[in-house]
Amino acid sequence: MTVAVSFGFLIIRKSSIENQYPGGITQFRQEWIPKQRKRPVTGEDEHLFGFYSMGGGTSLLIEKLKSVGFSTEETQPSPDLVFGTVTTGLLAPCDWLQIEELAEPLGGREPFMVCWLVGSKRGEIVEGKFC
């Protein structure tokens, strides 16, 4: 599958969460996937979690991930998590993430970008969850 990106975004590999986050993906979901929100804040496929924010709403999550050993583009050339914006794309190069702007906007939004794990198939687009 392919994760749609919106606003400012943070993309995290699920394999990194499973290997590094205390309690793995199950605990990560309990702590960080919101149960009730009025707008989309997360999107995921079988390989990636995406978090979206218009104003730095991911800073607590980023600090938690750094505290348990996740690397960022500031610390390693192939980080566990990457940042970007829908207007500029990735803020630093990333060798495990493919990102592309779509020619056809989805739902009337422009610009519209999607990402997927390098080496996997770009498939059905998964958008953020509405609660």
Image: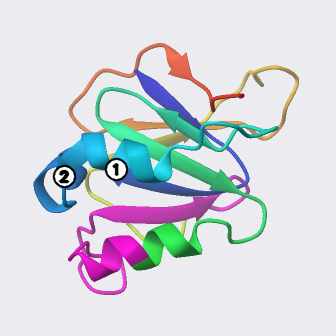
First to last magenta residue range: 64-89
Q: Secondary structure at mark 1?
A: helix
Tell me the CA gap for discs 1 and 2: 7 Å
Q: Are marks 1 and 2 in contact (CB under 8 Å)?
A: yes
Tell me the kind of residue under disc 1.
Answer: Phe
> Does residue 72 show up?
no
Crowdedness of circle 1 by 10 Å Cα count: few (<14), some, many (20+)? some
Q: Which residue is more in the foreground, 39 or 111?
A: 39
Residue on which disc 2 sits: 23
Q: Quadrant of residue 107?
A: top right
Query: In the displayed image of the protein, which residue is found farthest to the bottom?
Result: 75
Residue on which disc 1 sits: 28
The percent position of residue 78, horizontal first and vertical second, equals: 23, 68
Residue drawn 30% across the image and 38% down it: 117
Residue drawn 31% across the image and 26% down it: 46
Q: Looking at the image, is 75 positioned above or below residue 97?
A: below
Is residue 11 one of those drawn in magenta? no
Q: Quadrant of the N terminus?
A: top left
| For residue 56, side relative to residue 58 (left or right) | right
Tell me the kind of residue under disc 2.
Answer: Gly
The percent position of residue 131, horizontal first and vertical second, equals: 71, 28
The percent position of residue 80, horizontal first and vertical second, equals: 27, 63
Is residue 87 one of those drawn in magenta? yes
First-in-chain label (1 vs 2): 2
